[in-house]
Amino acid sequence: MSQQTLSTDLCPSLARIWARLATELQEQAIRLMAQLAFNLVVAQSDWPTKEYTHDLESRQTKDPA
């Protein structure tokens, strides 16, 4: 048994609201969602530069010169 989870199946009223939005507002909403998704990925990832910066700090404190 397969389940279809299209947004139009789940919330037909939302699909109608989206269709009535001006193109500029749709684009703005998509950009906002993309920015939120990016921020979530960045917040959950462990960037190598963080470790590199920490490694540089520990080397500087150990180096007597």
Image: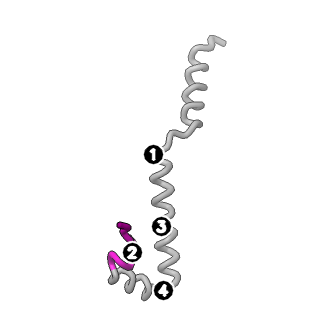
Which residue carries the number 1 mark?
Answer: 44
Q: Is residue 26 left or right of residue 62?
A: left
Q: Earlier in the sequence, mark 2 or mark 3?
A: 2
11 or 23, nearer to the observer: 11
Front: mark 3 or 1: 1
Q: What are the residue bounds of the magenta stretch?
A: 1-11
* Alpha-carbon span between mark 3 and mark 1: 18 Å
Q: In the rendered structure, find residue 32 and report the number of the disc placed on it.
A: 3
* Alpha-carbon span between mark 1 and mark 2: 27 Å
Identified by mark 3, the residue type is: Leu
* Alpha-carbon span between mark 2 and mark 3: 19 Å
Identified by mark 4, the residue type is: Ala
Identified by mark 1, the residue type is: Gln
* Alpha-carbon span between mark 4 and mark 2: 19 Å
Judge whether residue 10 is colored magenta.
Answer: yes
Residue 27, given in percent of the width and then of the height, sits at 52, 76
- Tag 1, which secondary structure? helix
Vertical arrangement, residue 18 with respect to residue 42, above or below: below
Which residue carries the number 2 mark?
Answer: 7
Q: Quadrant of residue 44?
A: top left
Give the tally of numbered discs.
4
Q: Who's the residue at 38% across and 84% down the image?
A: 17
Q: Quadrant of residue 52?
A: top right
